[in-house]
């Protein structure tokens, strides 16, 4: 489905305004306060891109990953509660004035940190909560509400090359675009970056990957194909596996493995009777170790085959469309 930024932002802004004001004793004043926050922080979003200053500015990193995938993994934001994310920062409403003051002091006392935190006077979320606005002060917006292209591209490159010496594989655009664009997003744009910026981010990533600096390229996501084509890949492989495993009455609750040839490739199948009553069969097909993988559930009574999206290498997947 085509990404429509105006519709996405209107939906999220409305939902979030309701979230922060519906339980207040004076929702009208609360809505005014929320609108003032939005004037400073921009549109509400679902998740931040990994290069956003809210995620990269804190010095203390997550325990198990160099890149922070969410603000909630960073110790700096531990006091946050009842939090929503915006293009330029966070709005959080912890219970307890002590927690709110601790959050503000912790953020503002770090020298050189490109963040600013401040208490808000008007209650939000609850009359008993203490709202704190956290602003990425270096983030400037274009007229369309997205982050200025020059800054977004710079932060994107810095985040990608920072840990290059520790990388073992290069991830494709399709594997990473959720983390690069933030959510919600389309093929090349989001509420953070417009189409111009997104297209250049993809070009930069593909150039870095082709250079070999991250290691061999790892292909996983097949989102470059339409939903209809991804369905065709799964259906082709899973239907062939079911035909190979027939008659299904001989399939038990134990995993049964088998191989078959299809379009010049050796396919490894696995099937089992999910509940032991013949009403549902779980089926998987792999080509190579991770070259192409599909899985689904088959319901013989209605001949219905459900599946999850396939994963693997683009050129191999094309054979089964």
Image (cartoon, grey):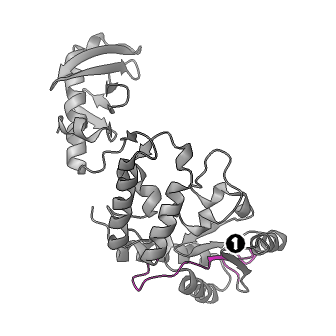
Q: Check disc 1: other Cα within 10 Å, few if <14, some if 14-19, many if 20+.
A: some
Say which quarter of the image contains residue 40: bottom right
The region drawn magenta spans 123-147
Residue occupying the point 70% across, 81% down: 123
Instruction: Return the x and y of residue 60 as percentages of the image width and height.
Output: 71, 57
Instruction: Return the x and y of residue 18 as percentages of the image width and height.
Output: 54, 76
Q: How many marks?
A: 1
Residue 127 horizontal side relative to residue 146, left or right: right
Q: Quadrant of the C terminus?
A: top left
Check the image and name the residue furthest to the right.
Answer: 98
Which sits in the foreground, 160 or 109?
A: 160
The residue tagged 1 is 113
Instruction: Return the x and y of residue 45 as percentages of the image width and height.
Output: 49, 69
Which sits in the foreground, 78 or 244?
A: 78
Any magenta on residue 167? Answer: no
For label 1, the SS is: loop
Residue occupying the point 63% across, 85% down: 30
Say which quarter of the image contains residue 96: bottom right
Q: Quadrant of the N terminus?
A: bottom left
Residue 84 horizontal side relative to residue 77, left or right: left
Residue occupying the point 22% across, 13% down: 247
Main secondary structure type of the part rendered in magenta: loop
Q: Is residue 238 above or below residue 50?
A: above
Q: Is residue 260 above or below residue 227?
A: above
Check the image and name the residue furthest to the top.
Answer: 250
Q: Is residue 218 above or below residue 263?
A: below
Any magenta on residue 135? Answer: yes
Residue 49 in sight from this viewpoint: no
Instruction: Return the x and y of residue 215 as percentages of the image width and height.
Output: 44, 41
Residue 158 in sight from this viewpoint: yes
């Amino acid at each position: 489905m085509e990404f429509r930024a105006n519709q996405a932002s209107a939906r999220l802004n409305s939902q979030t305004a309701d979230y922060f004001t519906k339980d207040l004793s004076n929702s009208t004043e609360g809505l005014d306060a929320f609108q003032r926050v939005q004037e400073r922080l921009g549109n509400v979003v679902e998740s931040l891109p990994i290069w956003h200053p809210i995620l990269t500015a804190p010095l203390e990193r997550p325990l198990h990953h160099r890149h922070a995938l969410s603000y909630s993994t960073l110790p700096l934001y531990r006091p946050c509660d009842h939090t929503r994310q915006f293009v330029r920062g966070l709005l959080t409403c912890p219970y307890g004035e002590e927690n709110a003051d601790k959050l503000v002091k912790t953020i503002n006392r770090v020298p050189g940190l490109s963040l600013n935190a401040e208490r808000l006077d008007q209650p939000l979320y609850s009359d008993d909560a203490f709202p704190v606005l956290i602003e990425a002060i270096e983030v400037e917006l274009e007229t369309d509400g997205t982050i200025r292209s020059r800054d977004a591209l710079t932060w994107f490159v810095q985040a990608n090359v920072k840990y290059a010496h520790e990388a073992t594989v290069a991830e494709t655009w399709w594997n990473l675009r959720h983390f690069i664009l933030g959510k919600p997003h389309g093929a090349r744009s989001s509420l953070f970056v417009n189409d111009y910026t997104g297209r250049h981010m993809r070009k930069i990533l593909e150039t870095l990957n082709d250079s070999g600096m991250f290691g061999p390229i790892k292909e996983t996501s097949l989102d470059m194909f339409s939903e209809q084509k991804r369905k065709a890949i799964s259906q082709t492989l899973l239907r062939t596996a079911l035909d190979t495993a027939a008659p299904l009455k001989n399939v038990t609750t134990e995993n049964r493995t088998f191989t078959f040839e299809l379009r010049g490739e050796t396919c490894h199948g696995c099937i089992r009777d999910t509940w032991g009553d013949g009403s549902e069969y779980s089926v998987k097909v792999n080509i190579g170790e991770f070259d192409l993988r599909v899985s689904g559930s088959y319901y013989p009574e209605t001949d219905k085959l459900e599946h999850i999206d396939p994963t693997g290498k683009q050129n191999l997947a094309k054979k089964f469309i």
